[in-house]
Image: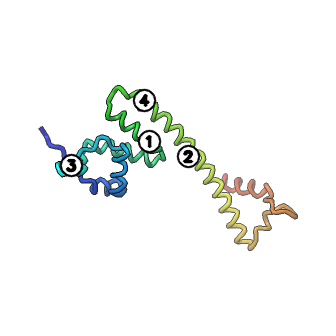
Amino acid sequence: METLKTYSIGQIAKKYHVTVPTLRYYDEQGLLPFVKRNEAGQRIFTDDDMGYLEVVDCLKRSAIPLRDIKTFMQWCVEGDDTLPERYQFMIDHEAALEQKIKVLQANLAFLRWKKWYYQHANEAGTEQIFFEPGTTQVDPKWREQYLAERQE
């Protein structure tokens, strides 16, 4: 029988660009139920653990709460009986992430408009060029001009 290669917590931390204390915290919080320990009580990871670690890393980077990641990882360890729950988990979090992306895209679009606005205000030496007479309200024609320029 082939022996699996093992990795220290430091090697895993380096590979996934996290700190050793972060990995210890994840383990203490139940996100790494697959982790084994050697005779000295140190956490050891194997090639088989890499898939789990990739899932934890992706879910964490997707801003999924740790308690949800813990639940998901428990289902993974439980096996095939939890496939429906894991599938639904992915559906739900995919939808949530797509919504976050839409919000971020809208924010990015607004920031780009304001960047254009401030570029032109800097060139003119004032933002007064954008205001409706006698107000500090931006004349809508400027936003329309910005959008038209983006279309070209």
Which badge, 2 or 1, is on the more N-terminal residue?
A: 1
Q: Secondary structure at mark 3?
A: strand
Q: Secondary structure at mark 4?
A: helix
Residue 101 numbered mark, or none: 2
Q: Is residue 42 above or below residue 1?
A: below
Residue type beneath disc 3: Thr
Label 2 to label 3: alpha-carbon separation:
37 Å
Which badge, 2 or 3, is on the more N-terminal residue?
A: 3
Residue type beneath disc 4: Glu
**For this rendering, which residue is in front, 83 or 116?**
83
Label 3 to label 4: alpha-carbon separation:
30 Å
Q: Nearer the viewer, mark 2 or mark 4?
A: 4
Residue type beneath disc 1: Arg
Colouring chosen for the image of the structure: rainbow
State the image coordinates of residue 16 (x, y, percent, origin top left).
35, 53
State the image coordinates of residue 9 (x, y, percent, origin top left).
27, 53
Q: Is residue 118 above or below residue 140?
A: below
Q: Residues within 10 Å of mark 4 (few under 14, many from 20)?
A: some
Which badge, 4 or 1, is on the more N-terminal residue?
A: 1
State the image coordinates of residue 8 (x, y, percent, origin top left).
24, 53
Which badge, 2 or 4, is on the more N-terminal residue?
A: 4
Label 4 to label 1: alpha-carbon separation:
15 Å
Query: Which residue in the structure is indicated by mark 1?
Result: 67
Residue 6 numbered mark, or none: 3
Query: Which residue in the structure is indicated by mark 4?
Result: 85
Q: Are marks 2 and 4 in contact (CB under 8 Å)?
A: no
Which badge, 3 or 4, is on the more N-terminal residue?
A: 3
**For this rendering, which residue is in front, 67 or 116?**
67
